[in-house]
Image: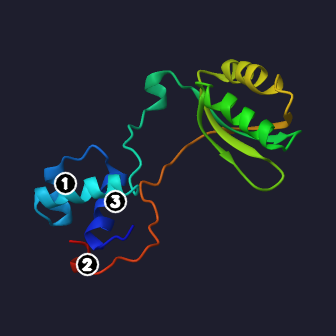
Amino acid sequence: MKFNSVDLKILRELRNNARISNKVLAARVNTPPSTCLARVQRLVQGGAISGFYAEFNPAEIGVGVQAMICIRMAMHDRAAIDGFRTHIKAQDEVVSFYLVSGQDDFMMHVAVRDVQHLREFILRALTERPEVDHIETRLMFEETRNPGFPVYQAAEDDADLE
């Protein structure tokens, strides 16, 4: 998909606030609202925008502890990896997880009520899995999300995308 400078501005604005109204978004990117809406729809249909999400205040929804957990697998065949991935996706405590390179195979971000809940999660969801060989848990004391996201594709001439 090709982007022009207006598309890139739209992506940046929506990354910062996905609930922005089309009228405000259009004003910020200096286009008429109808053009802005059509561009957003094109970005969604083209796959550049894959979803719109709400961010939560962890303390307000009962999350007292967050952690990053590194997992090393005992088995590295596709069935083990796919089975573990399916298992992890079903766990409510998992915010996100990543298949990574290096000595660990997976990293996951979990959100739980407290340390006891974290312990119970690790025992239930991880230590009972035969494909898991090693677990390291790191408590997160603070999370800062960068609302920006790098876009490395150069903007095309605006006339080419109208």
| Mark 2 → mark 1, Cα distance in angstroms | 18 Å
Query: Where residue 136 appears, x then y in whole percent?
Result: 80, 38
Q: Which residue was labeled with disc 1?
A: 37
| 102 versus 93 height, above or below | below
- The spot of residue 12 in percent (x, y) is 34, 60
**Residue located beneath label 3 in the image:** 11
- Sooner in the amino-acid sequence: mark 3 or mark 1: 3
**Foreground of the two, 144 or 20:** 20
Instruction: Give the residue type that dot 2 points to.
Output: Asp
Mark closest to the chain's N terminus, 2 or 3: 3
Please tell me the numbered disc located at residue 118: none
Q: How crowded is mark 2: few (under 14 residues within 10 Å), some or many (20 or more)?
A: few
Residue 18 x %, y %: 31, 46
Q: Distance between the residues labelled 3 and 1?
A: 12 Å
- Secondary structure beneath dot 1 equals helix
Vertical arrangement, residue 95 with respect to residue 40, above or below: above
Q: Nearer the viewer, mark 2 or mark 3?
A: 2
The residue at the point 28 percent across, 81 percent down is: 157
Query: Which amino acid type corresponds to the residue marked 3 in the rendered image?
Result: Leu
Q: Is residue 70 left or right of residue 52?
A: right
Instruction: Give me the residue at 77% from left, 27% from top.
Output: 126
User: Mark 3: which secondary structure?
Assistant: helix
Q: Name the residue under label 2.
A: 160
Q: Which image quarter is the C terminus in?
A: bottom left
